[in-house]
Image: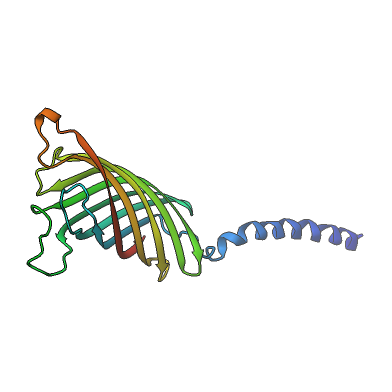
Amino acid sequence: MFLRTLLAIVPAVLIPVSAMSQATSPQQGPPEQGQASYKYEVYAGLGYTSINQVNLSRYGLLGADLSFTRDWGRYFGMSVMGNYYKPPVSNGNSTTVGNPGDPSVYEVLVGPEIHAPLFGNFSGFFHGGLGIEHTGGEHMNPDLSFAGGFGGGASYNINRRLAIRASGDRIGASFSLINNTPQLAYSGHRTWNSSGTVGVVFRF
């Protein structure tokens, strides 16, 4: 009788314990490879942009790119992106006519980002953004233009916190042409600029 009771109690105790260990073991183990471990991401890099809104421009501009991303889950985030471009890219020949005036550009955009691991330590992303663009040194009208565009790139993950990123974007804005007149109401002229950046990502 005692043996029969013992044989009945042992399975009754072991089955729930086994089920609990199976349910909790994934949480105790290490995170899945490539899975986001941090909610926030900061990027800083060197960038280049064309300036098609500046008439007769010959060179693009160099500058700095910054972004801050809040991740929700493994594949989705929201980003705030900002950049400032000023020094022109030239061939160093002082006899060659460069850009008219002294152009500079800054942009501030906000939008969604989709990212995913690709293979090994490489991951990719695609993002879009809407915001404002300013072109200085050219007496542009308006002073601030509505802007928006899209882009993407790839990152090489050095570890879970640090990565090296290269990306490119295509951003559109609408400024009036230089020497546009009030009679034309400074009608806007949509232009698209291509830009690229290389820099470092820090996750926390």
Give 28 or 169, whichever is nearer the viewer.
169
Quadrant location, the N terminus: bottom right
Residue 58 left/right relative to 74: left
Give 30 or 20, whichever is nearer the viewer.
30
Residue 70 left/right relative to 2: left
Give 25 or 70, whichever is nearer the viewer.
70
The colour scheme used here is rainbow
Q: Measured from the top left, where is residue 16 in percent x and y?
A: 72, 55
Task: Specify the quadrant of the image occupied by residue 42.
Answer: bottom left
Q: Residue at x 16, y 68 (%)?
A: 91
Q: Measured from the top left, where is residue 9 in percent x and y?
A: 81, 58
Q: Measured from the top left, where is residue 5 in percent x and y?
A: 87, 58
Residue positioned most to the right: 1
Is residue 34 visible to the viewer in this orientation of the structure? no
How many numbered marks, from 0 up?
0
Residue 53 left/right relative to 33: left
Residue 135 left/right relative to 126: left
Q: Residue at x 22, y 50 (%)?
A: 52
Give 102 or 157, whichever is nearer the viewer.
102
Task: Specify the quadrant of the image occupied by residue 110.
Answer: top left
Quadrant location, the C terminus: bottom left
Is residue 198 visible to the viewer in this orientation of the structure? yes
Q: Residue at x 23, y 54 (%)?
A: 83
Q: Measured from the top left, where is residue 32 in percent x and y?
A: 54, 63
